[in-house]
């Protein structure tokens, strides 16, 4: 886990194609007495992500799928890189994802997704112009903060990260409650949002589906086969993966799916992650 | 039937919608859902919202939950002045950023402050330990620091020089602990000045009208045992 595992090939491709943005220009030595040093051009779009995090995956998939040129800045949460001085300049809330577009910085994945959709004029279905269709996407994006998001994060941490990575015992009742709550949220996802539609907000994939699928992969990575007894949801997942593209979907989830193989945290890391761990209990 | 808004002004998100609709002269039929009488748990209301929560919007056959979605729907449908939710890409992003952040931050802390300080003991007869209350108030304090430090800073309003949906959502949240007797603006002159500006922009009369219910929250009649039994688990889940 770490920088090289985050985006693999994708990052290298991006780096090469963006070097005209990041490289700047330097005066050729023999002309330095003639030409003043030309400052490097303003940095293009930068996305500060850790693909271990669900909202980061949604942003990553959206940007890649829509061929939005960006420089990936990896912020390794487990290594505490979100507390670095550099990163705090970008997001004083010390969270990922974060966006930097020239001088403009932005936090919150929902805000970032909508900003990207608007700025890069993504196809309408991602965030439809139609009043009611858009309202359905807004409704999902709002509901999920305190519902599916919470239970997916807790499930992954209580089932996997806390016991295996941090060596911290999770009381069985706590895990049982969390799984029950997750189950409740999944039922709502099916009954209130998906219903008999192909996608959460209608016949086409939208940012709501991206946000939801990346959440659901969290418990999946911890060994919770949430799609097993839910054929409707499983069918929706297939459709979302197909719409996103299998390769991109897999790439975005590579880090997450390797999380179970992380070596146990050392003492220093355990100490540092203690407050975070408490949040998820 | 035209636009219907199912609200209880005890609830913060309901207040934001009420103020927004009234301020922008959006014609609507107010359907009061009295939470303290358990009206949100009725079969009739379940037809409107099976999640048994307010606010809810009903526009013909179209039913919408989630206050942020409702505010955005109203802003677009009724073509309200731009400053509420600006067209400008970056200005709009700032509003989106606040509306996203507040769900798990200020909203949660204000809700807990009201319930831990007043509603659990007074309405549901459930005592709350001093330590629990102290923790809740300390967390609220931290959220207020972020509100001032990251969002407001030296601007007139949260996301720029004009009032937006972000300010409405924030101010109605802060009136929750105010209704519980917490002096959130004391010792925070910046925030107090912002509050004055928001109230002036909304209109004093409308602001007071929207907050009449919450300011009397401490005088809530205790729930009868049947209602308490039904509501307590849901309340505890809501404020966790």
Image: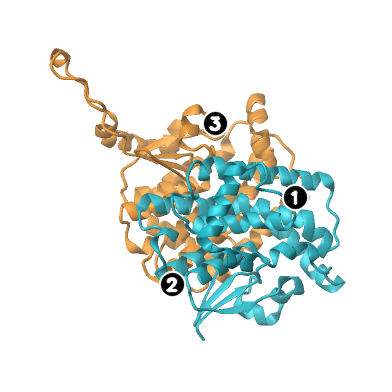
In 3D space, how far apart are the residues under numbered discs 2 and 1 (Cα atoms)?
39 Å
Chain ID at mark 1: A
Residue at the disc numbered 1:
A174
Q: Residue at x 80, y 65 (%)?
A: B219
As drawn, the label of residue A83 is: 3
Q: Colour of chain A?
A: orange
Chain ID at mark 3: A
Q: Residue at x 52, y 86 (%)?
A: B1
> Does residue A181 appear left or right of residue A100 in this picture?
right
> Which element type, helix, strand or loop, lies under badge 2?
helix
The answer as to whether the residues below labels 2 and 1 share one chain is: yes
Q: Nearer the viewer, residue A259 or B2?
A: B2
Above or below for B83 versus A261: below
In 3D space, how far apart are the residues under numbered discs 1 and 3 (Cα atoms)?
29 Å
Chain ID at mark 2: A
Q: Nearer the viewer, residue A129 or B11?
A: B11
Q: Nearer the viewer, residue B44 or B10?
A: B10
Rate crowding at label 1 as few (under 14), some (14 to 19) or many (20 or more) other CA atoms within 10 Å: some
Label 2 vs 1, first from the N-terminus: 2
As drawn, the label of residue A132 is: 2
């Amino acid at each position: 886990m770490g920088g090289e595992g985050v985006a693999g090939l994708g990052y290298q491709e991006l780096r090469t194609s963006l070097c005209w943005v990041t490289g700047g220009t330097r005066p050729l030595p023999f002309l330095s007495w003639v030409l003043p040093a030309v400052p490097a051009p303003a940095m293009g779009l930068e996305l500060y992500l850790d693909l271990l995090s669900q909202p980061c995956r949604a942003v990553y998939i959206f940007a890649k799928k829509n061929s939005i040129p960006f420089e990936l800045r990896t912020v390794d949460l487990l290594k505490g890189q979100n507390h670095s001085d550099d990163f705090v300049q970008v997001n004083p809330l010390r969270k990922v994802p974060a966006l930097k577009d020239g001088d403009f910085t932005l936090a919150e994945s929902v805000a970032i997704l909508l900003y990207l959709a608007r700025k890069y004029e993504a196809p309408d279905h991602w965030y439809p112009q139609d009043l009611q269709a858009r309202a359905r996407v807004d409704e999902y994006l709002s509901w999920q903060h305190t519902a599916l998001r919470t239970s997916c994060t807790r499930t992954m941490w209580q089932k996997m990260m806390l016991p295996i990575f941090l060596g911290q015992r999770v009381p069985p009742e706590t895990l049982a409650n969390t799984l029950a709550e997750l189950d409740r949220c999944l039922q709502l996802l099916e009954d209130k949002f998906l219903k008999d539609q192909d996608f959460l907000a209608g016949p086409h994939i939208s940012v709501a589906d991206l946000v939801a699928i990346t959440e659901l992969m969290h418990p999946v990575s911890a060994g919770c086969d949430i799609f097993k007894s839910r054929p409707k949801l499983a069918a929706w997942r297939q459709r979302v993966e197909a719409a996103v593209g299998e390769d991109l979907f897999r790439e975005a989830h590579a880090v997450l799916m390797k999380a179970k193989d992380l070596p146990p945290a050392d003492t220093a890391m355990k100490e540092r992650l203690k407050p975070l761990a408490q949040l998820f209990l | 039937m035209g636009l219907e808004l199912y609200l209880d002004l005890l609830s913060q998100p309901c207040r934001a919608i009420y103020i927004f609709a009234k301020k922008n002269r959006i014609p609507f039929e107010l359907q009061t859902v009295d939470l303290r009488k358990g009206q949100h748990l009725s079969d009739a209301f379940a037809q409107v919202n099976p999640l048994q929560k307010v606010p809810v919007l009903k526009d013909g056959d179209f039913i919408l939950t989630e206050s942020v979605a409702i505010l955005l729907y109203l802003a677009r449908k009724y073509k309200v002045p731009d400053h509420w939710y600006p067209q400008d890409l970056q200005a709009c992003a700032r509003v989106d950023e606040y509306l996203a952040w507040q769900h798990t931050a200020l909203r949660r802390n204000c809700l807990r402050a009201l319930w831990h300080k007043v509603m659990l003991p007074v309405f549901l007869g459930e005592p709350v330990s001093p330590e629990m209350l102290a923790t809740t108030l300390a967390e609220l304090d931290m959220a207020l620091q972020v509100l001032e430090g990251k969002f407001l800073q030296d601007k007139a309003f949260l996301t720029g020089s004009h009032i937006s949906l972000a300010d409405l959502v924030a101010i109605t949240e802060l009136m929750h602990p105010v209704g519980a007797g917490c002096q959130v603006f004391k010792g925070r002159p910046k925030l107090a000045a912002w509050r004055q500006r928001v109230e002036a922009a909304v209109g004093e009369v409308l602001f007071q009208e929207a907050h009449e219910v919450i300011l009397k929250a401490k005088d809530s009649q205790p729930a009868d045992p049947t209602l308490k039994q039904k509501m307590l688990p849901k309340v505890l889940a809501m404020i966790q």
